[in-house]
Image: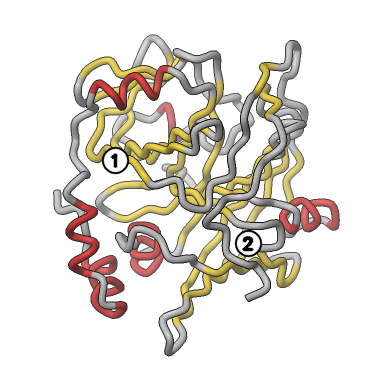
């Protein structure tokens, strides 16, 4: 399977970064190296993204557990203890054998992150993923959170769904310094991180969001997927109270003459789940790479 499909290549060529993308792409492979396996076992949080095999909607969701709940079971596979909550919009996708899934392990303490994309396989432990692509990302735009605690007794509350953002949800988005975006292509699924100062995600209306696509690794995996298939899922977390805001819809990318990119996202459904994540993180420090959201 080629690392870059035609839509990602088209963006690289349009912006003149194909050579840089090829250089960065040399670090991508199907194998889980020992350092990556060790990193996974330290994490209490894993973000997963996939398309629902019934509705086709793309969602991103948090999976959590004590360190060790995610672990490599071989050079090309990982297992995740437990299964998604029945109300999770990814519950069907993450238990359906062969479903393409993207995962992102992120450690705010060290500002390290690792992506592992593959396909779901049945597992007695919970969820297993056979890896197609494994690679690390740079810490750019990621805010450091120095510590976390697992909150005893915190469990997901009743989810609230709707076709547009409520006033409270709009405020939630406007205050966010981090979100995750899931995208899909016929080659598979992917989850990536977006970060910036609060306000970097613009609430255009109750059904539309927009954000600048800041310069990154020039691979254009997410934007390439969206160019080929506009379906996308967003996940925003309250890092203190554990609320998860999941949004599914479609996204398109506008590219200005100077190459500046703006992603415009149209919402189809939003699901808000209080106390979805049993983790309470310390407050963030500003990323040294964080662009000015007013630009």
Q: Quadrant of the C terminus?
A: bottom right
Looking at this view, is 11 or 124 the one in front? 11
Residue 57: in sight, yes or no?
no
Q: In this view, does 117 lie above or below 77?
A: below
Q: Position of residue 175 (x, y in %)?
A: 75, 53
Q: Position of residue 14 (x, y in %)?
A: 28, 80
Give the residue number, with chain letter if any, for mark 2.
Answer: 267
Give the residue number, with chain letter if any, for mark 1.
Answer: 135
Q: Which of pointers 1 and 2 indicates the residue nearer the eye? A: 1
Q: In this view, does 6 lie above or below 160?
A: below
The first of marks 1 and 2 along the sequence is: 1
Residue 151, numbered label = none
Question: Residue 115 appears in which quarter of the rendering?
Answer: top left
Q: Residue at x 22, y 38 (%)?
A: 132
Q: Residue at x 72, y 36 (%)?
A: 283
Disc 1 from disc 2: Cα separation: 30 Å
Q: In this view, does 119 lie above or below 235?
A: above
């Amino acid at each position: 399977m080629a690392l870059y499909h035609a839509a990602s290549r088209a963006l690289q060529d349009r912006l003149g970064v194909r050579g840089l993308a090829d250089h960065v792409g040399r670090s991508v492979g199907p194998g889980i190296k020992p350092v990556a396996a060790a990193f996974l076992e330290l994490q209490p949080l894993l973000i997963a993204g996939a398309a629902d095999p019934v509705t086709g909607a793309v969602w991103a969701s948090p999976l959590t557990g004590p360190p060790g709940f995610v672990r490599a079971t071989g050079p090309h596979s990982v297992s995740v203890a437990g299964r998604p909550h029945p109300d999770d919009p990814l519950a069907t996708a993450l238990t359906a054998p062969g479903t393409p899934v993207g995962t992102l392990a992120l450690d705010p303490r060290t500002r390290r992150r690792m992506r592992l994309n593959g396909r779901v396989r049945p597992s007695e432990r919970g969820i297993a993923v056979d890896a197609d692509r494994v690679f690390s990302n740079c810490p750019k735009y990621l805010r450091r959170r120095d510590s976390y605690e697992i909150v005893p007794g915190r469990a997901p509350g009743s989810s609230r769904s709707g076709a547009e953002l409520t006033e409270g949800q709009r405020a939630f988005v406007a205050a966010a310094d981090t979100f995750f975006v899931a995208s899909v292509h016929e080659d598979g699924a992917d989850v990536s991180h977006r970060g910036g100062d609060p306000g970097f995600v613009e609430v255009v209306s109750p059904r539309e969001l927009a954000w600048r696509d800041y310069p990154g690794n020039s691979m254009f995996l997410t934007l390439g997927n969206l160019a080929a298939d506009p379906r996308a899922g967003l996940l925003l977390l309250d890092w203190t109270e554990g609320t998860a805001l999941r949004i599914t819809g479609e996204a398109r990318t506008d590219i200005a003459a100077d190459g500046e990119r703006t992603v415009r996202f149209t919402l189809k459904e939003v699901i808000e789940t209080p106390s979805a994540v049993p983790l309470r993180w310390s407050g963030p420090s500003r990323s040294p790479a964080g662009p000015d959201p007013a630009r």
